[in-house]
Image: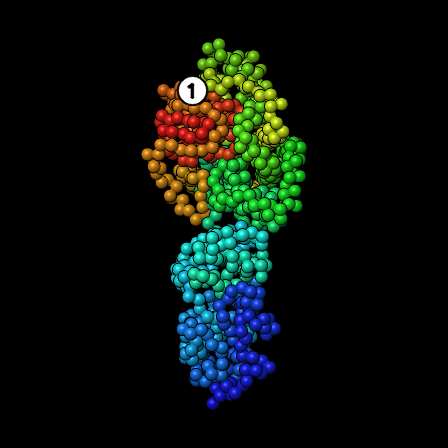
Amino acid sequence: MATNQLATRPMEGTTPLYITIGSGMASGFGVGAKGRNLDTAVKQGLLVPSGVILLDELWRQALINNVITIEDGAITCADPKAFYVALNLPAFPAKATVAVRSAFNVEDTPNLSMAGHFASITGVDPTKPDALIGALCDVWASSLEYDDIRRDVLVMEMVDAKHAGVAFTETNYEDDYVNYVEGTAEALVSGEVEGDIAEIRKLRLFEKGDLEEGPGREDATFLDRLQALLRRTRDVFGDANWDIEWADDGVICWLVQVRPITAGTRRNELFTIANHKEILPQLPSRYMVSVIESVAADLYDWYRGFDSSLPKHRPFIEVFKGRPYINLSLMTETVRALGLPTSLVTDSIGGEEGVKERFRPMRAISKLPNLAQFGLSQLNAVSSAEGTGKEITRRTHNLGETFNEVNETMQWTYATLVREMFNLTQAMSLPTAQLRRSNKLTQMAAASRSISTQMFDDLLPLREYVKDKPALLETLQNGTLPEDGEFRRQWGLYMAKYGHRGIYESDVARSRYRENPAPLLASLATETRIAAPHIAAEDTLGRVGKQVRRLIEAREQLRHDAMRGFERIRTKLLELADVAVERGQLPDRDSIWMLSLEEISLIDVDWNPEPGFWEGRRQEIETLAAYDMPDLLRRNDDPEQYNADIDPDVQRLSGMSLVAGEVSGKAWVLQEPSVDLPDGFEPENTVLVARSVDSGWIPTFMKVAAVVVETGGDLSHGSIILRELGVPSVTNVKTATRVFAEGDDIRVDGASGNVYK
């Protein structure tokens, strides 16, 4: 019989029919990556279930000697028992079952995994020839559509798994991504069940995991053991992108397979609107969102300039329902990669931490060269900001004569401004935290007068001039510029200095005070609750306080200078829009802000939207505006849940103290700045409750006794201004605009950061 021909070939011949996993021989026989990686893993001390690799030589001999036959896409063996005896496999433990799995050389390559493409047969009794040889034939048969490949096959003992699954360890992430089920993972890897998701901290060589830090192995979870296995796997195979199958029996976490990741994960990352919520309206213009989105990669490259090992291809900004959200997971992982605490991010820009990480000195030491570069950049932050302000002024004086030219300058200006803001914010984050811990932050603010706060101070002479002039006050209350010569002279000086600023001025679509001065004019007609500035003596600040003050003043001055550039860009875009209106390409000049960068550039080449385009776009914007978007969301969240009701029985919300002071009054809930108090409200008993605030809210601050802000950090523009003005205030008060309704009686305790109904 042909079967006997195979049986008579000695296993000790020049070419064996199988090798033991861990023999170190897989590479020498040309075994594909799937079997070769497991062979290497065992050789290097990783725990892999026992097994053998049936070599391609076995396939070729079985086929040549007619031990197996191929017919209609199936492979059969006439005498499985004789074939089984001829193989003479080593014995598996009693009552063990095995998995018979493909290990063909077209699998698990750097560019193609072919996961699930070929057969894997689990639960096979290795003592039964029909079962084992039948499984082997089925695995071989799954490869028949391929010619000229190696057909190595794995036969591995199956783990009596309590938990099993797949883990992705990726260089772009600080956490390993785990998908797991109870029991074995066949249904998971085949896609029959979703399984559970976990993210576990990726360990560096010198770091201890939760397993080592715990009281003992018996108290460790399977995720603790998996965390240690993943670190050891990276030790052996290198810090690269690995797809790892594993099984945990309650005592040992076994490595079942390791292969390169050919398509990275798209994780359910955490995003925050914190920084954008402060500087942009509730629904920014389509134009501005497209500008921000277009430069997102350039913005994160500022960090990569100091450490090229930081993630390359993760989105820094994503747009959800027309709003640009910052990837908070990426930001916190950036500081984690440097060994720094994640609170540095959230304390600076507001929002919440996804994964909270403490300072890790060993990791920081390993990153000393990178941190030194950060430090050097921050030492020069003030002079760099001054130079950037001048460069923005220079670049925005000559904008060209096409939409495309202006768009390119807009992108450059925004990206340059934000990168410089990164530098200043990073420079002040640590010393600001130090001032807060020592309770000296308020004192430092009292000694500061940034350009944004001077916008308020410089209104005081105008306020003094009109306070005893009823006719002027009546005109101002209507938001109208009086004819009074002296007032106009002083107003002209003020506009020359601040006319380019405005409400939500970081959206170039929003008008500037020069175009729409009504809010500022109306604010002059009402007595302000904010006292004249009391500047603390500089010699009381200390070195850290002086350092923070210089940085804050430089940052606000940079924003002031950049807004001049924004105004020039806005003016030029509207000039070009007027021409497009004359040509019939736009219905009106302001419709330009309803278009994206790409759409606006098409106007240069005589683009004319299809009939119904503008009505459809307006309806789309109206729909987006109706969403009550949260400060914090995950990529996979259902947007329709964002209008869920807030518990009406909430009696207290907590946030971050900005300025001490206890104020009781009526809640004035605003989405945008206003100077028109509701009927029955008086400045001395009005508490402003807002999503976020910046310099555009200064006229509103004059009308209230206290301020409650949903989103903001120590270093946000609005927080700086409120501290410098000395208005009792609390920031980072989640859901405040939804919990408190207009007219609610509330009490603000600025010292503790609590707000009570």
Q: Which residue is labeled 1 in the image?
A: 683
Give how far across and how far down residue 603 sits, in percent: 55, 41
Give how far across and how far down residue 41 sits, in percent: 55, 65
381 or 250: nearer the eye? 250
Quadrant of image for the C terminus = top left
Residue, x 47% and y 14% (percent of image)?
473
Please name the amino acid that badge 1 sits on: Pro
170 vs 416: above or below: below
Give neighbour class at mark 1: few <14, some 14-19, many 20+ (Cα, 10 Å): many
Residue, x 59% and y 48% (percent of image)?
363
Residue, x 55% and y 43% (percent of image)?
359
687 vs 249: above or below: above
28 or 394: nearer the eye? 28
- What number of labels is visible? 1
Side (left or right) of 73 relative to 597: left
Q: Is residue 717 visible?
A: no
